[in-house]
Amino acid sequence: DAKTTQPTSMDCAEGRAANLPCNHSTISGNEYVYWYRQIHSQGPQYIIHGLKNNETNEMASLIITEDRKSSTLILPHATLRDTAVYYCIVRALSGGYQKVTFGTGTKLQVIP
Amino acid sequence: ETGVTQSPTHLIKTRGQQVTLRCSSQSGHNTVSWYQQALGQGPQFIFQYYREEENGRGNFPPRFSGLQFPNYSSELNVNALELDDSALYLCASSPPGLAGSQETQYFGPGTRLLVL
């Protein structure tokens, strides 16, 4: 399975854009990039996913490089409630099942 | 529409005991996956159930087993509990999709298990 590398922690000022990078240099052609976040050891919350095109939804934007070896999650206007651990993962299909491998994540601290 | 629910929320067991954790999948979802999350680490994939059968497994020993029922709810059973089994156990469900498609997994709040 493709592994992901993320910075351990980041700070972002409230109201500013938070840009969270992720490296997945061994990603294969059929693997999607997913982002989840986890607040206070609650269950991870789905944010966004993509294959090779940039994606945007009401929560965030996902920018994937052309070679698909890295991506960036963008929270356009960070709020204090966005403080969480953000996980970048890749999804592998193996024998028809969906194996999900989480890394260590980035702890995002939004500062007032 | 209710989301993924898990029970109990917290549980304390002693080493060597057995435990059963329960998960109700989100309405319309037929695939359930289980994860173990140790303190300070990311979730680790245990296994996945689809149509009442295990169809994928991570690096967990056989004493971790599960079931999926016709209503798509699921159980995680752990036998011969060890201290290192103390963790947050997460259940995630995903909807039906095309064969081989990537369907988003939605997580429950988890069950926190402490083994003494």
Image: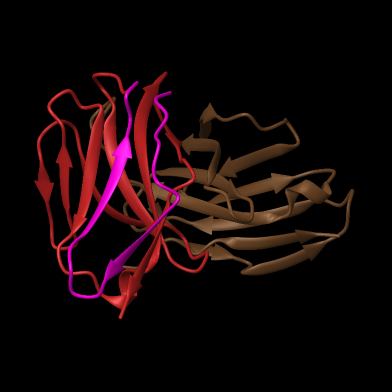
Chain colours: A red, B brown
Asked whether A8 or B11 is in front, the reply is A8
User: In terms of image quadrants, where is residue B78?
Assistant: top right
Q: Position of residue B93 (x, y in %)?
A: 41, 49
Q: Position of residue A66 (x, y in %)?
A: 12, 27
Residue depicted at x 36% and y 24%:
A93
Q: Is residue A10 magenta?
A: yes
Q: Is residue B52 above or below residue A94?
A: below
Asked whether B39 or B47 is in front, the reply is B39
The magenta segment? A1-26
Would residue B102 be seen by someone viewing this image from the given angle? no
Q: Is residue A21 magenta?
A: yes
Q: Say which quadrant the C terminus of chain A sits in.
A: bottom left
Q: Say which quadrant the N terminus of chain A sits in.
A: top left
Q: Position of residue A38 (x, y in %)?
A: 43, 60
Please give the count of numbered marks on the rendered protein. Answer: 0
Q: Is residue A108 above or below residue B102?
A: below
Would residue A78 be seen by someone viewing this image from the given angle? yes
Residue depicted at x 18% and y 32%:
A51
Asked whether B84 or B81 is in front, the reply is B84
Q: Position of residue B90 (x, y in %)?
A: 54, 54
Q: Residue furthest bottom?
A: A112
Residue depicted at x 17% and y 23%:
A67
Residue depicted at x 52% and y 47%:
B42
Does B15 sit left or right of B53 as displayed? right
Q: Is residue B111 above or below residue B36?
A: below
User: In terms of image quadrants, where is residue A23?
Assistant: top left
